[in-house]
Image (spheres, helix red, strand yellow):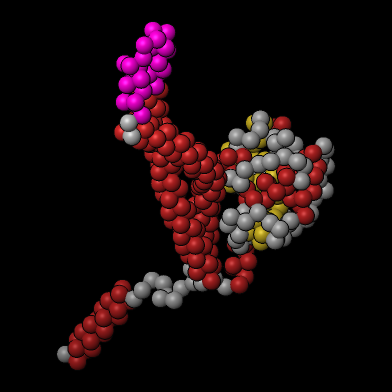
């Protein structure tokens, strides 16, 4: 009986232990984040931030154009205001003269004239006066309609400017949010793991680049920026975003490029990957949201992201779309 009781106690204890083990968490509660998972999330956040940044750059270009148009419309509206005021005064003077009796006086002279020739002449004058009065009213109506058209165009352009400025604010907020999330994720990693993420895909050597013509000036400038910071919307001298770097690099060669990767994709003839030469612009993602500069030997120099800054990396370190040769 005693042995049976011991066996029962042992069986119950073993079952309780098994049950307890079954309910224990499979991993520690404070397990370190998986570096591959963090790397993928950081990459995604940086890409989303850069997409917002390039949309921001596109919107800035559009805003500049809209504001220029708005200025021209306002100037045109001002000139039209002046023309309308001149006609308004002419009409006003005509009406005043009519009610002051000048028209009746002229009519009286025509009726009382004994000279047929003078009568005909004065009648012609009277007719011309009335025609001129009609023309003044027609001119006024025409100028007023022109002013209404210009006023409507100005109001529409001003509304577009306001909408675009609101969009710029939203894109800036998106950039800040994504960047803050990426910084938080990186902050959760140990220093060694964080460095592993930040240094991946880069090359520690500074390659010799052989470029010719105007491309030589562009490549030289871009390579001189290696190690500088990445800041969304920046175009030097101490920090750049991707399109800001390529824009400023080619500016040294006298070639004007827009501050937008998608706009730069339309800035010159497209070239095949097999025909790439140093200085060519290379583009990434669909829709296009990143641009770098080819420097030869399968490498590019680019302003990559806030953690990496301006650096040299492989041509296919990102999803490659195509290339353009400026100039």
Quadrant (top left/top right/bottom left/bottom right) for the N terminus? bottom left
Q: Is residue 292 above or below residue 142?
A: below
Is residue 120 a member of the stretch shown in magenta? yes
The stretch in magenta equals 102-129
Q: Is residue 293 above or below residue 53?
A: above
Spot the residue most to the front: 114
Spot the residue most to the bottom: 2
Spot the residue most to the left: 1
Residue at image point 66% right, 30% down? 269
Residue at image point 51% right, 55% down? 49
Q: Nearer the viewer, residue 117 or 55?
A: 117
Q: Nearer the viewer, residue 136 or 175?
A: 136
The picture places residue 321, in percent across and down from the top left corner, at 58, 38
Relative placement, left or right, of 322 versus 206 is left
Residue at image point 82% right, 37% down? 213
The answer to whether residue 73 is seen in the rendering is: no
Quadrant (top left/top right/bottom left/bottom right) for the C terminus? top right
The picture places residue 144, in percent across and down from the top left corner, at 38, 34
Residue at image point 68% right, 56% down? 236
The picture places residue 165, in percent across and down from the top left corner, at 46, 52
Relative placement, left or right, of 318 versus 117 is right
Q: Is residue 108 above or below residue 181?
A: above
Q: How many marks?
A: 0
Q: Quadrant of residue 23?
A: bottom left
The answer to whether residue 26 is seen in the rendering is: yes
Q: Quadrant of residue 11?
A: bottom left
Question: What is the magenta segment's predominant secondary structure?
Answer: helix
Is residue 251 a member of the stretch shown in magenta? no
């Amino acid at each position: 009986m005693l042995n049976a009781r011991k066996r029962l106690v042992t069986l119950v204890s073993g079952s309780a232990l098994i049950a307890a083990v079954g309910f224990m968490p499979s991993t520690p509660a404070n397990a370190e984040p998986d570096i591959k998972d963090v790397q993928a999330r950081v990459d995604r956040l940086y890409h989303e931030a850069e997409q917002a940044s390039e949309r921001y750059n596109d919107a800035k270009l559009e805003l500049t154009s809209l504001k220029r148009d708005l200025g021209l419309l306002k100037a045109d509206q001002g000139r039209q205001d002046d023309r309308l005021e001149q006609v308004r005064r002419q009409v006003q003077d005509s009406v005043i003269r009519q009610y002051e009796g000048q028209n009746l006086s002229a009519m009286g002279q025509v009726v009382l004239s004994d000279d047929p020739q003078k009568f005909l002449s004065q009648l012609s004058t009277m007719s011309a006066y009335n025609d001129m009065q009609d023309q003044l009213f027609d001119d006024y109506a025409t100028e007023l309609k022109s002013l209404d058209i210009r006023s409507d165009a100005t109001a529409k352009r001003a509304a577009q400017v306001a909408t675009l400025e609101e969009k710029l604010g939203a894109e800036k907020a998106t950039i800040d949010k994504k960047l803050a999330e990426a910084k938080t994720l990186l902050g959760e990693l140990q220093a060694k793991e964080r460095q592993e993420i930040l240094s991946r895909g880069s090359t520690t050597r500074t390659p010799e680049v052989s470029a010719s013509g105007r491309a030589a000036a562009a490549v030289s400038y871009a390579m001189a920026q290696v190690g500088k910071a990445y800041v969304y919307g920046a175009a030097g001298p101490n920090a750049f975003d991707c399109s800001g770097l390529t824009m400023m690099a080619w500016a040294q060669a006298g070639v004007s490029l827009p501050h937008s990767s998608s706009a730069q994709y339309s800035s010159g003839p497209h070239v095949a990957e097999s025909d790439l030469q140093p200085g060519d612009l290379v583009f990434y993602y669909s829709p296009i949201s990143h641009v770098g500069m080819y420097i030869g030997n399968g490498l590019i120099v680019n302003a990559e992201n806030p953690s990496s800054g301006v650096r040299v990396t492989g041509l296919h370190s990102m999803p490659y779309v195509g290339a353009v040769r400026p100039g």
